[in-house]
Amino acid sequence: MKRILVAIKRVVDYNVRVRVKPDGTGVITDGVKMSINPFDEIALEEALRIKEKGLAEEVVAVSIGPADCQQQLRTALAMGADRAIHVQTDAVIEPLSAARIFKSLIDREQPLLAILGKQAIDDDCNQTGQMLAALWGRPQATFASKVEVGATSATVTREVDAGLETIEIDLPAVITTDLRLNEPRYVKLPDIMKAKKKPLDTLDPAALGVTPAEQLRALKFEPPAQRSKGVMVKDAQELVAALRSKGLV
Amino acid sequence: MNKILIVAEHDGHNLNAAIAKCVSCARAIESAHVTIAVFAADPTAVAAQAANIAGVDTVVTVAHAANAHALAATLAPQVAELAGGYSHVFGPSTTFGKDLMPRVAALLGAPQLSDVMAVESATRFRRPIYAGNAIVTVEVAAGTQLVATVRVASFEAAKAAAAAAPISAATLKAELPTHTRFVSISAARSDRPDLQTATRVISGGRAFGSAENFQLLYALADKMGAAVGASRAAVDAGYAASDMQVGQTGKIVAPELYMAFGISGAIQHLTGIKDARTIVAINKDAEAPIFEVADYGLVGDLFQIVPELERLIAAGK
Protein backbone atom coordinates (compact mmCIF):
# COMPACT_ATOMS: atom_id res chain seq x y z
CA MET A 1 0.00 0.00 0.00
CA LYS A 2 1.21 3.49 -0.82
CA ARG A 3 1.58 4.91 2.63
CA ILE A 4 2.76 8.19 4.14
CA LEU A 5 4.10 8.38 7.68
CA VAL A 6 3.71 11.77 9.36
CA ALA A 7 5.43 12.89 12.56
CA ILE A 8 3.24 14.63 15.13
CA LYS A 9 4.98 16.26 18.10
CA ARG A 10 3.12 17.62 21.10
CA VAL A 11 4.58 21.03 21.95
CA VAL A 12 3.73 24.18 23.90
CA ASP A 13 1.33 26.15 21.71
CA TYR A 14 2.79 28.68 19.31
CA ASN A 15 1.01 31.58 21.03
CA VAL A 16 2.22 30.84 24.55
CA ARG A 17 4.95 33.07 25.90
CA VAL A 18 7.28 30.47 27.35
CA ARG A 19 8.92 31.20 30.69
CA VAL A 20 11.78 29.52 32.50
CA LYS A 21 11.06 27.96 35.91
CA PRO A 22 12.53 30.01 38.75
CA ASP A 23 14.75 27.08 39.81
CA GLY A 24 16.21 26.76 36.30
CA THR A 25 15.20 23.11 35.86
CA GLY A 26 13.12 23.67 32.75
CA VAL A 27 10.36 25.81 31.33
CA ILE A 28 6.87 26.17 32.77
CA THR A 29 4.51 23.73 31.07
CA ASP A 30 1.91 23.22 33.84
CA GLY A 31 -1.46 24.57 32.77
CA VAL A 32 -0.01 25.69 29.44
CA LYS A 33 -1.88 25.03 26.19
CA MET A 34 -0.33 22.21 24.17
CA SER A 35 -0.75 21.72 20.44
CA ILE A 36 0.59 19.88 17.42
CA ASN A 37 3.92 21.39 16.40
CA PRO A 38 2.89 23.83 13.61
CA PHE A 39 5.39 22.40 11.13
CA ASP A 40 3.97 18.91 11.77
CA GLU A 41 0.49 20.19 11.05
CA ILE A 42 1.81 21.36 7.69
CA ALA A 43 3.39 17.92 7.20
CA LEU A 44 0.05 16.22 7.86
CA GLU A 45 -1.79 18.60 5.55
CA GLU A 46 0.68 17.86 2.75
CA ALA A 47 0.28 14.11 3.27
CA LEU A 48 -3.51 14.45 3.13
CA ARG A 49 -3.31 16.46 -0.09
CA ILE A 50 -1.05 13.87 -1.70
CA LYS A 51 -3.55 11.19 -0.70
CA GLU A 52 -6.49 13.25 -1.98
CA LYS A 53 -4.75 13.51 -5.37
CA GLY A 54 -4.74 9.70 -5.45
CA LEU A 55 -0.96 9.48 -5.12
CA ALA A 56 -1.08 7.73 -1.75
CA GLU A 57 -3.59 5.42 -0.08
CA GLU A 58 -3.01 5.76 3.63
CA VAL A 59 -1.77 8.46 5.99
CA VAL A 60 -0.41 7.31 9.36
CA ALA A 61 0.25 9.83 12.13
CA VAL A 62 3.02 8.95 14.57
CA SER A 63 3.81 10.56 17.90
CA ILE A 64 6.50 9.75 20.44
CA GLY A 65 6.12 10.80 24.05
CA PRO A 66 3.94 10.63 27.16
CA ALA A 67 0.30 9.49 27.33
CA ASP A 68 -0.99 13.02 26.62
CA CYS A 69 0.37 12.85 23.05
CA GLN A 70 -2.83 10.96 22.21
CA GLN A 71 -4.68 14.29 22.28
CA GLN A 72 -2.56 15.52 19.37
CA LEU A 73 -2.92 12.19 17.57
CA ARG A 74 -6.73 12.43 17.90
CA THR A 75 -6.51 15.90 16.35
CA ALA A 76 -4.41 14.44 13.53
CA LEU A 77 -7.04 11.74 12.99
CA ALA A 78 -9.74 14.42 12.96
CA MET A 79 -7.79 16.32 10.31
CA GLY A 80 -7.90 13.20 8.18
CA ALA A 81 -5.13 10.76 9.09
CA ASP A 82 -6.35 7.16 8.63
CA ARG A 83 -4.73 5.77 11.74
CA ALA A 84 -2.25 6.69 14.42
CA ILE A 85 0.66 5.11 16.22
CA HIS A 86 1.67 6.31 19.66
CA VAL A 87 5.12 5.30 20.82
CA GLN A 88 4.55 5.90 24.50
CA THR A 89 7.44 6.90 26.73
CA ASP A 90 8.19 9.33 29.52
CA ALA A 91 11.89 9.27 28.70
CA VAL A 92 13.71 12.27 27.24
CA ILE A 93 13.68 11.69 23.49
CA GLU A 94 16.60 13.29 21.70
CA PRO A 95 16.38 13.70 17.92
CA LEU A 96 18.62 10.69 17.25
CA SER A 97 16.39 8.47 19.42
CA ALA A 98 13.29 9.83 17.67
CA ALA A 99 14.90 9.06 14.30
CA ARG A 100 15.72 5.52 15.43
CA ILE A 101 12.14 4.96 16.57
CA PHE A 102 10.80 6.29 13.25
CA LYS A 103 13.24 4.10 11.36
CA SER A 104 11.94 0.97 13.07
CA LEU A 105 8.37 2.03 12.23
CA ILE A 106 9.43 2.53 8.63
CA ASP A 107 10.73 -1.03 8.58
CA ARG A 108 7.25 -2.17 9.65
CA GLU A 109 5.15 0.17 7.54
CA GLN A 110 7.27 0.45 4.36
CA PRO A 111 6.00 3.94 3.47
CA LEU A 112 6.45 5.83 0.23
CA LEU A 113 7.15 9.03 2.13
CA ALA A 114 7.90 10.13 5.67
CA ILE A 115 6.93 13.76 6.16
CA LEU A 116 8.10 15.65 9.24
CA GLY A 117 8.12 19.28 10.32
CA LYS A 118 11.50 20.90 9.69
CA GLN A 119 11.80 21.71 13.38
CA ALA A 120 9.80 21.54 16.57
CA ILE A 121 9.11 24.92 18.11
CA ASP A 122 10.09 23.71 21.58
CA ASP A 123 13.69 22.50 21.25
CA ASP A 124 14.22 24.14 17.82
CA CYS A 125 16.59 21.30 16.90
CA ASN A 126 15.82 20.80 13.20
CA GLN A 127 17.44 17.33 13.14
CA THR A 128 15.02 14.38 13.20
CA GLY A 129 14.04 14.26 9.52
CA GLN A 130 17.62 14.44 8.31
CA MET A 131 18.72 11.80 10.83
CA LEU A 132 15.88 9.53 9.76
CA ALA A 133 16.88 9.87 6.11
CA ALA A 134 20.46 8.95 7.00
CA LEU A 135 19.45 5.88 9.02
CA TRP A 136 17.07 4.83 6.25
CA GLY A 137 19.71 5.46 3.56
CA ARG A 138 17.15 7.41 1.53
CA PRO A 139 16.93 10.95 0.09
CA GLN A 140 15.95 13.97 2.16
CA ALA A 141 14.25 17.10 0.94
CA THR A 142 14.32 19.53 3.84
CA PHE A 143 12.57 22.89 4.26
CA ALA A 144 10.09 22.08 1.48
CA SER A 145 7.87 24.83 0.11
CA LYS A 146 6.52 22.81 -2.84
CA VAL A 147 6.21 19.05 -3.36
CA GLU A 148 5.27 17.27 -6.58
CA VAL A 149 5.03 13.51 -6.24
CA GLY A 150 5.57 11.37 -9.34
CA ALA A 151 5.51 7.61 -9.88
CA THR A 152 9.04 6.87 -8.70
CA SER A 153 10.41 10.25 -7.74
CA ALA A 154 9.37 13.61 -6.32
CA THR A 155 10.38 17.14 -7.21
CA VAL A 156 10.75 19.37 -4.19
CA THR A 157 11.34 23.10 -3.93
CA ARG A 158 13.30 24.03 -0.81
CA GLU A 159 13.58 27.33 1.01
CA VAL A 160 17.33 27.90 1.35
CA ASP A 161 19.34 30.96 2.37
CA ALA A 162 20.10 31.91 -1.23
CA GLY A 163 16.53 31.55 -2.50
CA LEU A 164 14.54 28.58 -3.72
CA GLU A 165 16.33 25.35 -4.62
CA THR A 166 14.68 22.55 -6.56
CA ILE A 167 15.86 18.97 -6.19
CA GLU A 168 14.65 15.64 -7.49
CA ILE A 169 14.52 12.69 -5.11
CA ASP A 170 13.83 9.03 -5.72
CA LEU A 171 11.11 7.45 -3.60
CA PRO A 172 10.86 6.40 -0.86
CA ALA A 173 12.19 9.51 0.82
CA VAL A 174 11.97 11.91 3.74
CA ILE A 175 10.52 15.40 3.36
CA THR A 176 10.61 18.11 6.01
CA THR A 177 8.21 21.00 5.75
CA ASP A 178 8.71 24.75 5.79
CA LEU A 179 6.05 27.31 6.66
CA ARG A 180 4.83 28.12 3.19
CA LEU A 181 4.23 24.61 1.91
CA ASN A 182 0.50 24.83 2.60
CA GLU A 183 -2.12 26.13 5.00
CA PRO A 184 -3.45 23.33 7.20
CA ARG A 185 -7.21 22.73 7.18
CA TYR A 186 -9.45 23.37 10.14
CA VAL A 187 -10.90 20.42 11.97
CA LYS A 188 -14.70 20.14 11.76
CA LEU A 189 -16.80 18.86 14.64
CA PRO A 190 -18.16 15.74 12.86
CA ASP A 191 -14.57 14.79 12.06
CA ILE A 192 -13.67 14.97 15.74
CA MET A 193 -16.47 12.48 16.43
CA LYS A 194 -15.34 10.21 13.60
CA ALA A 195 -11.73 10.39 14.77
CA LYS A 196 -12.68 8.69 18.03
CA LYS A 197 -13.39 5.51 16.10
CA LYS A 198 -10.17 5.51 14.07
CA PRO A 199 -7.43 3.08 15.14
CA LEU A 200 -4.75 4.35 17.49
CA ASP A 201 -2.08 1.80 18.39
CA THR A 202 0.20 2.22 21.36
CA LEU A 203 3.70 0.81 21.32
CA ASP A 204 6.66 0.79 23.64
CA PRO A 205 10.08 1.99 22.34
CA ALA A 206 11.51 -1.32 23.58
CA ALA A 207 9.06 -3.20 21.36
CA LEU A 208 10.67 -1.35 18.47
CA GLY A 209 14.13 -2.29 19.67
CA VAL A 210 15.10 1.25 20.68
CA THR A 211 16.41 2.28 24.07
CA PRO A 212 16.28 6.08 24.18
CA ALA A 213 19.77 7.34 25.04
CA GLU A 214 20.25 10.61 26.84
CA GLN A 215 23.51 11.88 25.41
CA LEU A 216 22.78 15.58 25.74
CA ARG A 217 22.26 16.42 29.40
CA ALA A 218 20.47 19.70 30.08
CA LEU A 219 22.21 21.22 33.12
CA LYS A 220 20.22 24.42 33.53
CA PHE A 221 17.69 26.67 31.85
CA GLU A 222 17.92 30.45 31.97
CA PRO A 223 15.87 33.30 30.58
CA PRO A 224 17.63 35.15 27.76
CA ALA A 225 19.46 38.41 28.39
CA GLN A 226 16.94 41.22 28.12
CA ARG A 227 17.47 44.25 25.97
CA SER A 228 16.64 47.42 27.81
CA LYS A 229 14.05 49.74 26.39
CA GLY A 230 15.61 52.68 24.58
CA VAL A 231 14.40 56.16 23.80
CA MET A 232 11.56 57.42 21.66
CA VAL A 233 12.41 60.06 19.06
CA LYS A 234 9.85 62.50 17.74
CA ASP A 235 10.58 62.46 14.01
CA ALA A 236 12.78 61.20 11.20
CA GLN A 237 15.17 64.11 11.58
CA GLU A 238 15.87 63.34 15.22
CA LEU A 239 16.31 59.66 14.38
CA VAL A 240 18.84 60.32 11.63
CA ALA A 241 20.74 62.71 13.92
CA ALA A 242 20.91 60.05 16.64
CA LEU A 243 22.07 57.34 14.23
CA ARG A 244 24.57 59.70 12.64
CA SER A 245 26.08 60.58 16.03
CA LYS A 246 26.75 56.87 16.56
CA GLY A 247 28.19 56.48 13.06
CA LEU A 248 25.43 54.09 12.03
CA VAL A 249 24.31 55.91 8.88
CA MET B 1 43.70 18.05 22.36
CA ASN B 2 40.27 18.68 20.83
CA LYS B 3 40.28 18.02 17.12
CA ILE B 4 37.56 20.04 15.44
CA LEU B 5 36.43 19.57 11.87
CA ILE B 6 34.47 22.42 10.28
CA VAL B 7 32.56 21.72 7.07
CA ALA B 8 32.99 24.65 4.68
CA GLU B 9 29.96 26.22 3.10
CA HIS B 10 30.66 27.83 -0.26
CA ASP B 11 29.18 28.46 -3.70
CA GLY B 12 32.06 26.91 -5.64
CA HIS B 13 34.00 30.18 -5.72
CA ASN B 14 33.67 31.91 -2.39
CA LEU B 15 33.78 30.64 1.17
CA ASN B 16 30.66 31.67 3.09
CA ALA B 17 31.33 34.34 5.71
CA ALA B 18 29.70 32.08 8.31
CA ILE B 19 32.77 29.83 8.33
CA ALA B 20 35.07 32.42 9.91
CA LYS B 21 32.49 32.60 12.71
CA CYS B 22 32.50 28.82 13.10
CA VAL B 23 36.29 29.08 13.49
CA SER B 24 35.80 31.53 16.37
CA CYS B 25 33.40 29.09 18.02
CA ALA B 26 35.86 26.22 17.57
CA ARG B 27 38.72 28.34 18.93
CA ALA B 28 36.71 28.97 22.09
CA ILE B 29 37.24 25.29 22.97
CA GLU B 30 40.38 24.62 25.00
CA SER B 31 43.44 23.24 23.12
CA ALA B 32 41.58 23.19 19.85
CA HIS B 33 43.11 21.93 16.62
CA VAL B 34 40.92 23.28 13.81
CA THR B 35 40.57 21.74 10.36
CA ILE B 36 38.33 23.08 7.61
CA ALA B 37 37.06 20.53 5.08
CA VAL B 38 36.21 21.79 1.60
CA PHE B 39 34.05 19.52 -0.55
CA ALA B 40 33.75 20.82 -4.11
CA ALA B 41 34.12 19.94 -7.77
CA ASP B 42 37.23 22.13 -7.71
CA PRO B 43 38.09 23.20 -4.17
CA THR B 44 41.21 25.26 -5.00
CA ALA B 45 39.87 28.80 -4.59
CA VAL B 46 37.70 28.06 -1.56
CA ALA B 47 40.50 26.12 0.18
CA ALA B 48 42.85 29.09 -0.23
CA GLN B 49 40.30 31.36 1.44
CA ALA B 50 39.79 28.86 4.27
CA ALA B 51 43.55 28.58 4.83
CA ASN B 52 43.72 32.35 5.30
CA ILE B 53 41.48 32.46 8.36
CA ALA B 54 43.39 32.97 11.62
CA GLY B 55 42.98 30.01 13.95
CA VAL B 56 42.74 27.41 11.21
CA ASP B 57 45.45 24.74 11.58
CA THR B 58 44.84 22.72 8.42
CA VAL B 59 42.57 22.60 5.41
CA VAL B 60 41.51 19.33 3.79
CA THR B 61 40.03 19.28 0.30
CA VAL B 62 37.85 16.62 -1.27
CA ALA B 63 37.48 17.15 -5.02
CA HIS B 64 34.64 15.25 -6.67
CA ALA B 65 32.30 16.10 -9.55
CA ALA B 66 29.36 15.05 -7.33
CA ASN B 67 30.26 17.91 -4.97
CA ALA B 68 29.43 20.60 -7.52
CA HIS B 69 26.17 21.21 -5.64
CA ALA B 70 25.81 20.93 -1.89
CA LEU B 71 23.42 17.99 -1.49
CA ALA B 72 23.27 16.64 2.06
CA ALA B 73 22.76 13.05 0.90
CA THR B 74 25.94 13.24 -1.20
CA LEU B 75 28.07 15.18 1.26
CA ALA B 76 27.11 13.38 4.48
CA PRO B 77 28.87 10.05 3.83
CA GLN B 78 32.03 11.95 2.84
CA VAL B 79 31.95 14.16 5.94
CA ALA B 80 31.29 11.10 8.12
CA GLU B 81 34.26 9.26 6.62
CA LEU B 82 36.54 12.24 7.10
CA ALA B 83 35.25 12.84 10.65
CA GLY B 84 36.91 9.75 12.13
CA GLY B 85 39.34 10.86 14.84
CA TYR B 86 37.73 14.26 15.34
CA SER B 87 36.15 15.09 18.70
CA HIS B 88 33.84 17.76 17.24
CA VAL B 89 32.28 18.21 13.82
CA PHE B 90 30.92 21.72 13.20
CA GLY B 91 28.89 23.34 10.49
CA PRO B 92 27.22 26.75 10.30
CA SER B 93 23.60 27.09 11.40
CA THR B 94 22.57 28.15 7.90
CA THR B 95 20.21 26.15 5.69
CA PHE B 96 23.34 24.38 4.34
CA GLY B 97 24.47 23.29 7.82
CA LYS B 98 20.97 22.59 9.12
CA ASP B 99 20.36 20.28 6.18
CA LEU B 100 23.70 18.49 6.28
CA MET B 101 24.90 18.17 9.87
CA PRO B 102 22.09 15.99 11.33
CA ARG B 103 22.59 13.57 8.45
CA VAL B 104 26.28 13.42 9.33
CA ALA B 105 25.47 12.96 13.03
CA ALA B 106 23.16 10.03 12.34
CA LEU B 107 25.78 8.34 10.16
CA LEU B 108 28.29 8.78 13.00
CA GLY B 109 25.76 7.74 15.64
CA ALA B 110 26.66 10.99 17.38
CA PRO B 111 24.39 13.47 19.14
CA GLN B 112 23.99 16.94 17.64
CA LEU B 113 23.70 20.32 19.30
CA SER B 114 21.92 22.85 17.10
CA ASP B 115 22.60 26.60 17.19
CA VAL B 116 25.51 26.68 19.64
CA MET B 117 25.65 30.26 20.95
CA ALA B 118 28.37 29.94 23.57
CA VAL B 119 31.15 27.52 24.47
CA GLU B 120 31.73 26.77 28.15
CA SER B 121 34.13 23.87 27.61
CA ALA B 122 34.82 21.09 25.12
CA THR B 123 31.80 19.24 26.48
CA ARG B 124 29.54 22.05 27.66
CA PHE B 125 27.67 24.51 25.45
CA ARG B 126 24.78 26.94 25.54
CA ARG B 127 21.98 27.11 22.98
CA PRO B 128 18.61 28.84 22.62
CA ILE B 129 15.31 26.94 22.72
CA TYR B 130 11.66 28.02 22.48
CA ALA B 131 12.47 30.73 19.93
CA GLY B 132 15.11 32.13 22.24
CA ASN B 133 12.76 32.39 25.22
CA ALA B 134 15.09 30.13 27.16
CA ILE B 135 18.79 29.36 27.03
CA VAL B 136 19.83 25.84 27.95
CA THR B 137 23.28 24.71 29.05
CA VAL B 138 23.93 21.24 27.68
CA GLU B 139 26.67 18.78 28.50
CA VAL B 140 27.85 15.68 26.66
CA ALA B 141 29.89 12.95 28.30
CA ALA B 142 33.65 13.33 27.80
CA GLY B 143 34.81 11.23 24.89
CA THR B 144 31.50 11.47 23.03
CA GLN B 145 31.98 12.66 19.47
CA LEU B 146 29.77 15.73 19.06
CA VAL B 147 28.21 17.25 15.97
CA ALA B 148 27.06 20.85 16.20
CA THR B 149 25.76 23.73 14.17
CA VAL B 150 27.10 27.13 15.14
CA ARG B 151 24.70 30.02 15.58
CA VAL B 152 26.72 32.43 13.48
CA ALA B 153 25.10 35.58 14.91
CA SER B 154 26.65 34.73 18.28
CA PHE B 155 30.29 34.80 17.14
CA GLU B 156 32.61 37.41 15.67
CA ALA B 157 34.36 36.38 12.48
CA ALA B 158 37.96 35.18 12.94
CA LYS B 159 40.46 37.58 11.40
CA ALA B 160 42.74 36.96 8.45
CA ALA B 161 45.76 34.78 9.18
CA ALA B 162 49.32 36.12 9.09
CA ALA B 163 50.41 32.95 7.31
CA ALA B 164 48.21 30.53 5.39
CA ALA B 165 47.48 27.10 6.91
CA PRO B 166 48.66 24.03 4.98
CA ILE B 167 46.20 22.51 2.50
CA SER B 168 46.08 18.79 1.77
CA ALA B 169 43.88 16.72 -0.52
CA ALA B 170 41.98 13.67 0.73
CA THR B 171 40.65 10.78 -1.32
CA LEU B 172 37.63 9.10 0.20
CA LYS B 173 36.13 5.67 -0.31
CA ALA B 174 32.54 6.58 0.59
CA GLU B 175 30.03 5.40 -1.98
CA LEU B 176 27.97 8.36 -3.16
CA PRO B 177 24.23 7.97 -3.71
CA THR B 178 22.52 9.03 -6.94
CA HIS B 179 19.01 9.12 -5.46
CA THR B 180 19.13 12.87 -4.86
CA ARG B 181 19.68 15.24 -7.78
CA PHE B 182 20.12 18.99 -7.99
CA VAL B 183 17.74 20.59 -10.49
CA SER B 184 17.99 24.36 -10.13
CA ILE B 185 18.25 27.30 -7.81
CA SER B 186 16.41 30.55 -8.26
CA ALA B 187 18.26 33.13 -6.28
CA ALA B 188 16.98 36.65 -6.29
CA ARG B 189 20.08 38.31 -7.72
CA SER B 190 20.69 41.45 -5.85
CA ASP B 191 23.55 43.90 -5.49
CA ARG B 192 22.57 44.48 -1.89
CA PRO B 193 24.60 42.95 0.92
CA ASP B 194 23.80 39.48 2.22
CA LEU B 195 21.23 39.54 5.02
CA GLN B 196 23.20 37.37 7.43
CA THR B 197 26.50 39.24 7.15
CA ALA B 198 25.35 42.81 6.43
CA THR B 199 26.33 45.54 8.90
CA ARG B 200 22.97 47.25 8.32
CA VAL B 201 19.63 45.51 7.87
CA ILE B 202 16.27 47.15 7.32
CA SER B 203 13.12 45.04 7.43
CA GLY B 204 9.51 45.55 6.53
CA GLY B 205 6.31 44.07 7.87
CA ARG B 206 2.77 43.53 6.72
CA ALA B 207 2.08 47.25 7.16
CA PHE B 208 3.63 47.82 3.73
CA GLY B 209 0.49 46.36 2.20
CA SER B 210 2.00 45.23 -1.11
CA ALA B 211 5.15 44.08 -2.87
CA GLU B 212 5.16 47.40 -4.76
CA ASN B 213 5.29 49.35 -1.52
CA PHE B 214 8.31 47.30 -0.45
CA GLN B 215 10.15 49.24 -3.17
CA LEU B 216 10.24 52.15 -0.73
CA LEU B 217 12.37 50.00 1.53
CA TYR B 218 14.71 48.93 -1.29
CA ALA B 219 15.27 52.57 -2.23
CA LEU B 220 16.20 53.41 1.37
CA ALA B 221 18.40 50.29 1.63
CA ASP B 222 20.37 51.35 -1.42
CA LYS B 223 21.05 54.76 0.09
CA MET B 224 22.22 53.09 3.32
CA GLY B 225 24.11 50.14 1.85
CA ALA B 226 21.75 47.92 3.82
CA ALA B 227 20.35 44.44 3.30
CA VAL B 228 16.56 44.09 3.25
CA GLY B 229 14.66 41.65 5.45
CA ALA B 230 11.00 40.98 6.14
CA SER B 231 8.71 39.66 8.83
CA ARG B 232 7.01 36.31 8.38
CA ALA B 233 3.70 38.13 7.88
CA ALA B 234 5.15 40.13 4.98
CA VAL B 235 6.59 37.00 3.37
CA ASP B 236 3.37 35.03 3.85
CA ALA B 237 1.44 37.89 2.25
CA GLY B 238 3.74 37.73 -0.78
CA TYR B 239 5.29 41.18 -0.29
CA ALA B 240 8.81 39.77 0.05
CA ALA B 241 10.72 36.63 -0.98
CA SER B 242 11.01 33.73 1.49
CA ASP B 243 14.80 34.13 1.72
CA MET B 244 14.19 37.56 3.27
CA GLN B 245 12.40 36.23 6.34
CA VAL B 246 14.04 37.15 9.63
CA GLY B 247 13.17 35.22 12.79
CA GLN B 248 13.00 31.87 14.56
CA THR B 249 12.37 29.87 11.42
CA GLY B 250 13.99 32.27 8.97
CA LYS B 251 17.33 34.00 9.23
CA ILE B 252 19.07 35.16 12.39
CA VAL B 253 20.77 38.50 11.82
CA ALA B 254 23.34 40.36 13.90
CA PRO B 255 24.05 43.68 12.19
CA GLU B 256 25.39 46.88 13.72
CA LEU B 257 22.07 48.50 12.87
CA TYR B 258 18.66 46.86 12.49
CA MET B 259 15.66 48.94 11.51
CA ALA B 260 12.17 47.43 11.67
CA PHE B 261 9.48 49.21 9.69
CA GLY B 262 5.87 48.30 10.33
CA ILE B 263 6.84 45.14 12.23
CA SER B 264 4.89 44.63 15.45
CA GLY B 265 7.54 42.40 17.01
CA ALA B 266 6.23 38.86 17.48
CA ILE B 267 8.56 36.84 19.72
CA GLN B 268 9.47 34.68 16.70
CA HIS B 269 10.75 37.81 14.91
CA LEU B 270 12.52 39.25 17.94
CA THR B 271 14.55 36.06 18.37
CA GLY B 272 16.05 36.71 14.95
CA ILE B 273 17.21 40.25 15.71
CA LYS B 274 18.25 40.42 19.33
CA ASP B 275 21.95 40.17 18.56
CA ALA B 276 21.78 43.40 16.56
CA ARG B 277 23.95 46.12 18.14
CA THR B 278 21.33 48.86 17.69
CA ILE B 279 17.65 48.28 16.99
CA VAL B 280 15.38 50.96 15.58
CA ALA B 281 11.61 50.48 15.42
CA ILE B 282 9.23 52.52 13.33
CA ASN B 283 5.57 51.68 13.81
CA LYS B 284 2.18 53.34 13.70
CA ASP B 285 1.13 51.55 16.88
CA ALA B 286 2.83 53.03 19.95
CA GLU B 287 1.96 49.85 21.86
CA ALA B 288 3.75 47.49 19.45
CA PRO B 289 6.00 45.04 21.36
CA ILE B 290 8.93 45.87 19.05
CA PHE B 291 9.38 49.12 21.01
CA GLU B 292 10.22 47.08 24.14
CA VAL B 293 13.50 45.97 22.56
CA ALA B 294 14.28 49.01 20.40
CA ASP B 295 17.13 51.39 21.21
CA TYR B 296 15.31 54.07 19.22
CA GLY B 297 11.59 54.12 18.59
CA LEU B 298 9.57 56.33 16.31
CA VAL B 299 5.77 56.28 16.16
CA GLY B 300 4.41 57.29 12.80
CA ASP B 301 3.34 56.46 9.28
CA LEU B 302 6.02 54.51 7.46
CA PHE B 303 4.85 55.78 4.08
CA GLN B 304 5.95 59.25 5.16
CA ILE B 305 8.92 58.25 7.29
CA VAL B 306 10.69 55.88 4.87
CA PRO B 307 10.99 58.44 2.02
CA GLU B 308 11.93 61.13 4.53
CA LEU B 309 14.71 58.96 5.96
CA GLU B 310 15.91 58.28 2.44
CA ARG B 311 16.07 62.02 1.73
CA LEU B 312 17.79 62.88 5.03
CA ILE B 313 20.37 60.11 4.70
CA ALA B 314 21.13 61.00 1.07
CA ALA B 315 21.44 64.68 2.02
CA GLY B 316 23.98 63.90 4.73
CA LYS B 317 26.38 62.16 2.37
Image (cartoon, rainbow, N blue to C red):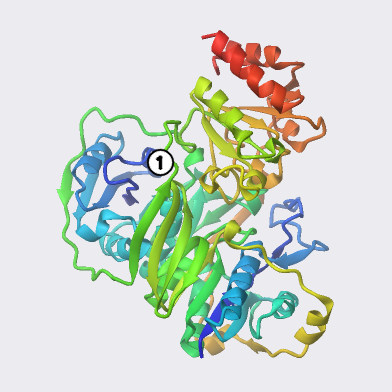
Q: Mark 1 highlights which residue?
A: B18
Q: Nearer the viewer, residue B237 or B92?
A: B237
Give the quarter of the image for residue A138: bottom left
Could you tell me residue B34's position as x and y percent? 30, 45
Identity of the amino acid at label 1?
Answer: Ala
Could you tell me residue B274's position as x and y percent? 62, 37
Residue A10 can be seen in this image: yes
Chain hosting mark 1 = B
- Residue furthest to the top in view is B316
Left or right of residue A72, residue B40 in this image: left
Q: Residues within 10 Å of mark 1 (few under 14, many from 20)?
A: many
B307 w.r.t. B164: above or below:
above
Mark 1: which secondary structure?
A: helix
Residue B144 can be seen in this image: no
- Residue furthest to the front in view is B212
Residue under the point 64% across and 43% down? B234
Q: Nearer the viewer, residue B76 or B13?
A: B13
Give the quarter of the image for residue A62: bottom right
Residue under the point 55% across and 17% down? A249
Could you tell me residue B167's position as x and y percent? 17, 44
Left or right of residue B116, residue B292 in this image: right
Residue under the point 77% across and 16% down? A234
B148 w.r.t. B32: above or below:
below
Left or right of residue B262, residue A137 in this image: left
Q: Nearer the viewer, residue A221 or A158?
A: A158
Residue under the point 31% across and 41% down? B15
Could you tell me residue B282's position as x and y percent? 71, 27
